[in-house]
Amino acid sequence: MNSALKYIYYSILLLPVMAGCEKLYNPPAIASPGSYLVVEGVINTGADSTIIKLSRTVKLSSTSTVNPEKGAIVMAVSDQNTNYPLVETSAGNYTSPGLNLDNTRKYRLSIKTTNGRQYLSDLVAASVTPPVDSIGFTVQSNGIQLYVNTHDPNNNTHYYRWDYAETWQFHSEYPSAWITNGKAIVQRTDAQLVYSCFANDASSDIVLGSSAKLAQDVIYQNPLTSVAATSEKLETKYSILVHEYALTSDAYNFWTNLKKNTEQLGSIFDAQPSTINGNIHNINNAAEPVLGYISACLVQSKRIFISNSQLPLAWLPVYPYQCGQGPYYYGVPPLVSDNLIALNSTIIPTSAITAPGSPVITGFLAADIECVDCTIRGTKTQPSFWK
């Protein structure tokens, strides 16, 4: 789920106040320090992990966007009152290995926070998500459009949600064969090279599909995301891992409403803000807003790779920084010793300057660190799934 869930409560309240105002007014609901529980994730009934993320809403005026709910007791609970505990593996993230649950039962989530409040989601029937048939892409004038295909031969699913994780390999603007040791400029070892890295990102939009109005339960080329032709994601190789979730009609309505409130606002022609009712409740205070919707389903996944060789030759990545290389010399300003030797220097030598016809190094070309060191935006460690 995307972070919009954290802000939507305040955004819905704020929009009517903003319309037509000449003077700033903060209503009590906005000015108050209310902090409401946000619950993200699904109960995965299959062999993959169940991951539930707990956090608290933050005010629109806050400089912080992350407010994890730590130290909670979290369990998946069956309709036979069998408990499946989740362990907090990082701040606000609660995880269990594959639960391999009975898909004929119903399940709910139980949460007890450190302040003693207890929350329960409604019991929901476990859904069996059909496999992802394929992930593909179309080449357009300004980039690629990725899509997903799936179908349920039993004609039982009808409502779907997808999220995805992107990984790509990229290069810095300039390779660097040199590095400072604090006393001198020396050649880099292979382990010190910082030209090629991997980066990743998770989906932040809400991707839904429905076959409810079709004669067959088939989803064909449902859009997932697009990648611009100038994006670094397509520079070398790009991969996308797609997770597919079967939804009930109630869950689909929740996600549709959330999508309208977070992604389809901004003009008089868009949907008007509305209340988002989830299925998670404070058992001792029904009036307390809790943001989120818990489903139980067998989660399906599929990954594809797209190589640069599959794309138009004319497509070139645009580097995210303005870069240029300047010369630094021994003995003649600007000096190597003043600019490149210090261990904390943000100017990195890229290549050596030698006198014409001589191997003697008289200086170095160098560039700002963000133009040379790919590790400030990624990692050199190749993912285990990379091929």
Image: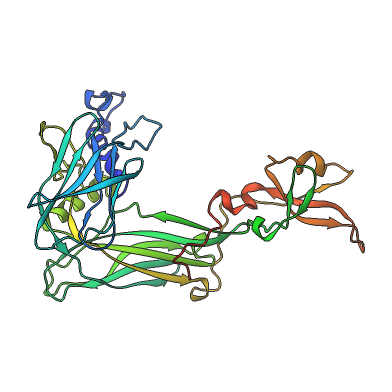
Q: Residue at x 58, y 56 (%)?
A: 319
Q: How many marks?
A: 0
Whole-percent x, y for residue 99 in the image: 22, 58
Whether residue 318 is visible to the viewer of this picture, yes or no, is: yes
Q: Is residue 380 left or right of residue 103?
A: right
User: Residue 200, position in %: x, y?
Assistant: 45, 56
Picture layout, residue 167 above or below residue 16: below
Query: In this picture, is 328 found above or below 281?
Result: below
Taking the view exactly as shown, the residue that stands out farthest to the left is 80
- Which residue is nearer to you in this view: 372 or 206? 372
* Image position of 260 (left or right of 122): right
Q: Indicate whether 151 appears above or below 384.
A: below
Q: Point out residue 377 in the picture as x, y percentages from the top left corner.
A: 54, 50
Residue at point 61%, 57% (across, down): 172
Residue 217 image position (x, y, % from top left): 15, 72
At a point 65% along the width and 58% down the height, the residue shown is: 191
Image quarter for residue 146?
Answer: bottom left
Q: Is residue 266 visible?
A: no
